[in-house]
Image: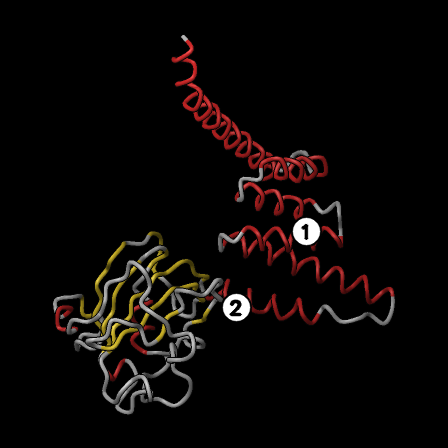
């Protein structure tokens, strides 16, 4: 695990141009951090304390994972964060020990689960050290972070994801022959299918669909690509598109249990959707019907 603020190398999160006003709905940090003294002591020396604001679900974040998190960092007696990514339109995955190297945050994140929101206080040894990070963070500063875990990939999935994205860019080169083009297309198809699956696991169906459709550009009869596209469309409640993709996949592999089960799931979701639509229409026109009677 990487060192704290006194260690050499990059320390994340680092104050920078992304700093902004306090995110809406978050508690201001104008009060001294002593009010967290009764919070859970994660480091056994009071250096990392945690207060859970909203519980998460599933397993705790494993070492080496890559995370999609929202965060805001505060100095004591300040109501504006010195760093925050809460206003970013899209959040990139950040890997523990590589992109996230603030010691206190590493310790804290390893206790969190998907969907959890927590507040942490870090003493200087677990934050920015004796020197601080001028001009925004003074020497020997105790800091507070509010963190929300949106999702994460475990170590193996994370490594595979970044290898896949790197491989995909490499496979974009121009071939020197038709045989090499076939080899590139075969490799690219596998990468695209795995990227589509990864984005489905990250609950980002639009990206999953985009990679699935790229795979279909290479092989329009690939059942796995059609299945991934159908799954993505179902997640986005685009039921007609989902059915089109899944039926095409079923024609190619009529006895595939995953495809058939997804079609059953689609039928159930669509039935529930239509029932809700019907109920809404009845409520909309009920006053008219009663008044006309």
Residue 289 position, x and y percent, is 43, 14
> Residue, x 61% and y 39% (percent of image)?
242
Residue 114 position, x and y percent, is 37, 56
Label 2 Cα neighbours within 10 Å, binned few <14 / some 14-19 / many ≥20: some
> Residue, x 29% and y 84% (percent of image)?
137
- Residue under label 2: 159
- Residue under label 1: 213
Residue 247 position, x and y percent, is 67, 35
> Residue, x 29% and y 75% (percent of image)?
104
Is residue 178 depicted above or below 47 in this figure? above
Give the number of the mark in front: 2 or 1. 1
Is residue 278 depicted above or below 258 in this figure? above
Instruction: Point out the residue furthest to the front here.
Output: 292
Label 1 Cα neighbours within 10 Å, binned few <14 / some 14-19 / many ≥20: many
User: Mark 2 touching mark 1, by CB under 8 A?
Assistant: no
Question: Relative to the observer, which residue lies in front, 161 or 232?
Answer: 232
């Amino acid at each position: 695990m990487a060192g704290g603020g006194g260690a050499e190398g990059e320390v994340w999160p680092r104050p920078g141009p992304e700093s902004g006003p306090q995110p809406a709905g978050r508690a201001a940090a104008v009060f001294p951090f002593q009010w967290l003294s009764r919070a859970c002591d994660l480091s056994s020396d009071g250096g990392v304390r945690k207060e859970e604001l909203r519980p998460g679900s599933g397993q705790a974040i494993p070492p080496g994972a890559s995370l999609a998190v929202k965060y805001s960092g505060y100095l004591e007696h300040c109501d504006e964060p010195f760093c925050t990514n809460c206003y970013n339109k899209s959040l990139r995955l950040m890997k523990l020990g590589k992109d996230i190297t603030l010691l206190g945050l590493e310790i804290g994140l390893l206790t969190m689960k998907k969907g959890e929101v927590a507040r942490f206080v870090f003493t200087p040894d677990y934050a920015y050290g004796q020197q601080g990070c001028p001009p925004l963070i003074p020497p020997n500063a105790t800091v507070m972070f509010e963190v929300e875990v949106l999702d994460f990939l475990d170590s193996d999935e994370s490594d595979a994801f970044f290898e896949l994205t790197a491989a995909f860019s490499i496979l974009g080169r121009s071939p020197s022959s038709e045989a090499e083009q076939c080899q590139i297309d075969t490799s690219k198809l596998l990468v695209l299918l795995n990227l589509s699956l990864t984005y489905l696991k990250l609950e980002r169906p639009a990206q999953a669909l985009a990679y699935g459709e790229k795979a279909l550009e290479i092989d329009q009869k690939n059942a796995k690509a059609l299945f991934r596209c159908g799954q993505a469309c179902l997640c986005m409640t685009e039921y007609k598109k989902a059915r089109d993709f899944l039926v095409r996949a079923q024609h190619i592999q009529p006895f595939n249990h995953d495809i058939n089960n997804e079609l059953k799931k689609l039928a159930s979701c669509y039935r529930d959707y239509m029932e809700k639509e019907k109920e809404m229409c009845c409520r909309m026109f009920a006053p008219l019907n009663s008044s006309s009677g």
